[in-house]
Every structure is written in structure tokens, then in C-alpha cells.
């Protein structure tokens, strides 16, 4: 029997719930639950960097300078990270972007020159360090690319403004974005290097998620150089705020976060926007805890997945309501147009999920 698509399952479940007098947001309503398939990586690193290219090709990056790549759907993994000195062996590659089995860009995080960017064009056989932070107060959190050539990286504020650098040659060179067009940061405001999704780009627009202030905020830009900012309706403060922002088009977006010190806290940990991030509304039902990563499912226009240390949740209405379906620990998630989602996290965890 042919497998029923998740869109059809959603329709069937919605009408069944409505027929029973239940709201789609009701926690106890019957709800189809997908299942992560855990893959063996042979590593104990924590993988916050995740870059699936296709159903077969995926890259992950994380602690202790670790970068792995699979070309067979996650059945086997090869260590392909840069050769590091003993002094640099503890670098944490918290974000990675990839376009094929050969080309990838990785970001290491930390104060001072611990924030670096490396690029490879031969599947990790060799790496070139293309950026080393020289600003003592900068701390880079995330990178994002809108094309294989054009990308940006985001740092915590420097001199009262979020620091952004930009590349137009696939990461080979980087320039600081003029801060004059960026809305001022608030005292204590910063990003979170938790999943590589505190910086996002969709439909020619750019977004930056922050916390450390209450509420957490989301910066937005139509060109990467002129930025406005709005409160995100997600509770913020020390260690709390917006950890992940994603848009499926120029208008419709989701944001998730919370407090990483309170992983099961689930009050005001998600929000949604339908005007390009100008305004944000809190969800009517939240994920079941702090969530560090999120991803829309391309081709399933209202569907998205969020993950965190205490579990995974799915929304079928663009973030208005969330439903928990797994209690495994993951930091990052990214879904493909085929309906395959990849997730990664602590203790070498990488998993796949089929939603098509």
C-alpha cells in the first residue's frame, strides 16, 4: 500500500479532530507522530553544525575540531575536518554550510581569534582558513548563504551594533558590513551559537535572532546592509531568548528558543510572523521545552520541525501550534525538499526523518 503523505495525514487528522469537537492545537488530540532514525557516526562529538545537501549527502561539525561527511544517506561517515595544531584542537565548529560532497564552509566560535572560517572545495581533503577574527570583543555565532557565492556571518555586538561580515566569492574572502545601517543592540543582547540558525536568509531577505534581553528580538533586512528589529514575543534574559529563526518565503516565519538552562521550560518559547518579521505573535501551544533549532519542510508549506535537548516538535500551521513527537536530544535540524529531515546533537547523534 502506498505511504500516505504527511499533508494528507494532516488533513485527515484535522477533520477527525474537528469532527470530534477538538481544536487542532489540542495537546490530547490524535496526531500522527513521525520517528527519527538514529544513525551511527562513530563519534562522541557534539554536532551543532548541520548541512544536508541531499538525501544522500550530509555534513556535520562540532566539538574538538570535528567535521564528518556522509555520501550514502548516513550509513557511513568519514572524518574530513581540517588538520589542526594541538593548540587549536579544541576549536568548536558550531556552524557549517555545504553545497555538494566537495564544497563546504565551517565556522568556529569563541572570543578573539577562536572565531574563524575555513573553506574546502575537495571534500575536506584540504581546507583554507579564509577568516580570522581580529576584533577582541567579537564572538561569531552563525553563518548563512543565500547562494553558493553570497553569504554572511554574524557576531555578538561590537560597539553597540551586531557585527556582520559578508562574502561574495563563496567564503574565500570576507568584509565587515558597515554598521551604520544596523539597528542598535540593547545592553546584554547577543546571539546564540546553538544550531547555526541564529542567522537565516530566504527570498533575498536576512534575519538575525538574539537573546539576553526580554523579550528576545529578531533583526530583519531586505539587503543585508539596512536592518530593523522587532520584539519576538519569546521570553529572554540571561541565557534566554530567540535561538532559531526561519522563513519559508518573504512573509511567513517561525522563531523558537527559551532558556537553555531550563530545557523543559515551555512558556513563550515560540512565535510566528506573517509580515516578514515586522510583528511576531506567540504560539497558542508551545514546543515542550527550550528549542535550539528549527526548519521548515520545503514543499509542505505550513510544516516545520523544531528540536532541542528535551525533544522534537512539529507544527502543521506555521508555528501557531506545536506538537511533540520525540524526546531525544538534538541541537540542529534541517529538512530537504524531498521531505527528509536531518538532525544532529550531543554524543555524536545524527538522525533522519521521512515526512514525504
Image (spheres, helix red, strand yellow):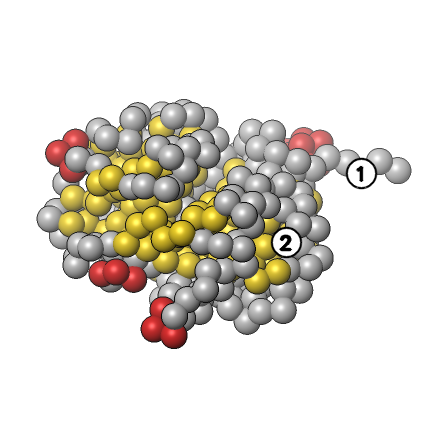
Please identify the residue farthest to the right as the structure is shown: 1
Question: Taking 182 as reference, is 30 above or below it?
Answer: below
Cβ–Cβ below 8 Å for labels 2 and 1?
no
Q: Which x, y percent locates residue 23?
A: 57, 38
* Tag in front: 2 or 1: 2
Choose between 234 and 131: the one closer to the eye: 131
Q: Residue placed at 41% from the left, 66% from the top?
A: 84
- The kind of secondary structure element at disc 1 is loop
Q: Which x, y percent locates residue 50?
A: 51, 51
Q: CA distance from mark 2 to mark 1?
A: 27 Å
Q: Residue placed at 22% from the left, 40% from the top?
A: 176
Choose between 273 and 67: the one closer to the eye: 67
| Neighbourhood count class around disc 2 (C-alpha, 10 Å): few under 14, some 14–19, many 20 upward | many
Q: Which x, y percent locates residue 88?
A: 36, 69
Q: Residue placed at 88% from the left, 38% from the top?
A: 1
**Residue 44 marker:** none
Q: Residue placed at 49% from the left, 34% from the top?
A: 318
Picture quadrant of residue 161? top left
Please identify the residue farthest to the bottom as the structure is shown: 86
Where does label 2 land, which residue?
70
Where does label 1 land, which residue?
3
Q: Earlier in the sequence, mark 2 or mark 1?
A: 1
- The kind of secondary structure element at disc 2 is strand
| Neighbourhood count class around disc 1 (C-alpha, 10 Å): few under 14, some 14–19, many 20 upward | few
Locate the C terminus by quadrant.
Answer: top right
Examine the rendering and report whether any part of residue 356 can be seen: yes
Examine the rendering and report whether any part of residue 19 can be seen: no
Amino acid at each position: 500500500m502506498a505511504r500516505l503523505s504527511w499533508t494528507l495525514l494532516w488533513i485527515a487528522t484535522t477533520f477527525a479532530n474537528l469532527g470530534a469537537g477538538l481544536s487542532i492545537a489540542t495537546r490530547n488530540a490524535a496526531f500522527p507522530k513521525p520517528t527519527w532514525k538514529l544513525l551511527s557516526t562513530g563519534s562522541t562529538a557534539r554536532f551543532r553544525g548541520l548541512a544536508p545537501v541531499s538525501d544522500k549527502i550530509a555534513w556535520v561539525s562540532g566539538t574538538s575540531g570535528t567535521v564528518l561527511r556522509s555520501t550514502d544517506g548516513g550509513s557511513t561517515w568519514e572524518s574530513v575536518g581540517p588538520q589542526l595544531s594541538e593548540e587549536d584542537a579544541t576549536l568548536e565548529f558550531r556552524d557549517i554550510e555545504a553545497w555538494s560532497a566537495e564544497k563546504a564552509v565551517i565556522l568556529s566560535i569563541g572570543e578573539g581569534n577562536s572565531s574563524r572560517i575555513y573553506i574546502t572545495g575537495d571534500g575536506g581533503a584540504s581546507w583554507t582558513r579564509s577568516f580570522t577574527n581580529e576584533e577582541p570583543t567579537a564572538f561569531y555565532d552563525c553563518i548563512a548563504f543565500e547562494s553558493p557565492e553570497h553569504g554572511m556571518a554574524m557576531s555578538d555586538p561590537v560597539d553597540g551594533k551586531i557585527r556582520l561580515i559578508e562574502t561574495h566569492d563563496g567564503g574565500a574572502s570576507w568584509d565587515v558590513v558597515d554598521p551604520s545601517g544596523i539597528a542598535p543592540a540593547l545592553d546584554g543582547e547577543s546571539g546564540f551559537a546553538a544550531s547555526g540558525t541564529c542567522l537565516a536568509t530566504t527570498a533575498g531577505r536576512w534575519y538575525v535572532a538574539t537573546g539576553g534581553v526580554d523579550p528576545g528580538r529578531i533583526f530583519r533586512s531586505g539587503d543585508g546592509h539596512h536592518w530593523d528589529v522587532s520584539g519576538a514575543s519569546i521570553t529572554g534574559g540571561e541565557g534566554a531568548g530567540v535561538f532559531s529563526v526561519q522563513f519559508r518565503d518573504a512573509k511567513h516565519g517561525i522563531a523558537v528558543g527559551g532558556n537553555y538552562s531550563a530545557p523543559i521550560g515551555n512558556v513563550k518559547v515560540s512565535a510566528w510572523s506573517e509580515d516578514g518579521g515586522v510583528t511576531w505573535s506567540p504560539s497558542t501551544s508551545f514546543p515542550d521545552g527550550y528549542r535550539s533549532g528549527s526548519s521548515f519542510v520545503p514543499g509542505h508549506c505550513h510544516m516545520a520541525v523544531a528540536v532541542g535537548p528535551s525533544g522534537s516538535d512539529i507544527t502543521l500551521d506555521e508555528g501557531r501550534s506545536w506538537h511533540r513527537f520525540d524526546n531525544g536530544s538534538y541541537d540542529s535540524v534541517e529538512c530537504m525538499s524531498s521531505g527528509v529531515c536531518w538532525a544532529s546533537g550531543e554524543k555524536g547523534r545524527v538522525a533522519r526523518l521521512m515526512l514525504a
